[in-house]
Amino acid sequence: MTKTLLITGMSGAGKTQVMRTLEDLGYFCVDNLPPTFIPKFIELCMKKQDDSDKLALAVDTRGGKFFGAFDEVLDQLTSEKIPYELLFLDADDSTLIRRYKETRRRHPLNGKNGLSADISQEREILRKVRTRATTIIDTSKTTTKQLRNRIISLYGTNGSLPAMTIVVQSFGFKFGLPLDCDMVFDVRFLPNPFYDPALKEQCGNDPAVVSFLQEKPVTGKFEKKLYDLIQFLLPQYVQEGKSQLMIGVGCTGGRHRSVYIANSLGKFIESCGYKAKVMHRDLMKK
């Protein structure tokens, strides 16, 4: 059964942040969908039998004249026994005015009598819809992080985000830095197996190269310091709500030292209770 969450409320009350959080929670999110399309869209998703089993549809006064049909659409969903939840985001006038002043954005109603009049008019437009809300969140005194945590507690599985995805990627500096890494460790200071004729054509996956690097005292010292840093950082990223962490490990060619350290780091991360995927970007390059 497709779970449908409709999000509406005052402009500037935090719908954008809510939609971002819901995306992290695995919802298929559509912003500013004309209300008349909602029943058909839900019906389409119910037929697809794919990952779109959690829908988040944001509807607000940006829809102009189309928004007037929202109340009738809610009646239609109820009469057709299509389950949904309605989240209404609100904030007091002074907070909304301050947020618009800070962002310098134009209010969707954009009337001739100023921002205060636009906010007052929008409240009146939304008055009836607000009474139908399953949940109302007042964001007046709520920080972005607090709002995110509230949405996670309400709509996350067991009140939490999916486990953070951790990718450890080895690479060669000669082929360029990976652009999607959150942090990069340069291991070109480690002894290079490339200059050993017996190891040159092998890689960091091969036992001989592993033994070569493990025998060097500097390798063990570096791994200990690296593990201490990673063990400290991972729970901080989880607490901050980061959904994916990309760790790059680079050496000159991306075949020996970086491959070994990436493998080693991936195993350590797994031993700490996290899921890690190890990738070797340049392993097959010459």
Image (cartoon, rainbow, N blue to C red):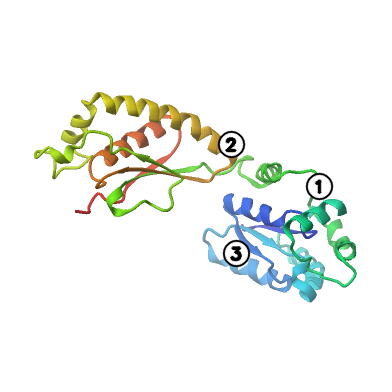
The image quadrant of residue 186 is top left
Which residue does the numbered mark 1 point to in the structure image?
A: 140
- Label placed on residue 239: 2
- Mark 2 in CB contact with mark 1 (< 8 angstroms): no
Q: Nearer the viewer, mark 1 or mark 3?
A: 1
**SS assignment at label 1:** loop
- Label placed on residue 270: none
Q: Is residue 1 left or right of residue 130?
A: left
The residues bearing labels 2 and 3 have C-alpha atoms spaced at a distance of 34 Å
Label 2 environment density (alpha carbons within 10 Å; few <14, some 14–19, many ≥20): few
Identify residue type, mark 3.
Answer: Met
112 above or below 54? Answer: below
Q: Residue at x 78, y 73 (%)?
A: 64
**SS assignment at label 3:** helix
- Label placed on residue 46: 3
30 above or below 149? Answer: below
The residues bearing labels 2 and 1 have C-alpha atoms spaced at a distance of 23 Å
Label 3 environment density (alpha carbons within 10 Å; few <14, some 14–19, many ≥20): some
Please state which of residues 143 and 42 is positioned toward the viewer in this rendering.
143
Q: Earlier in the sequence, mark 2 or mark 3?
A: 3
Identify residue type, mark 2.
Answer: Gln
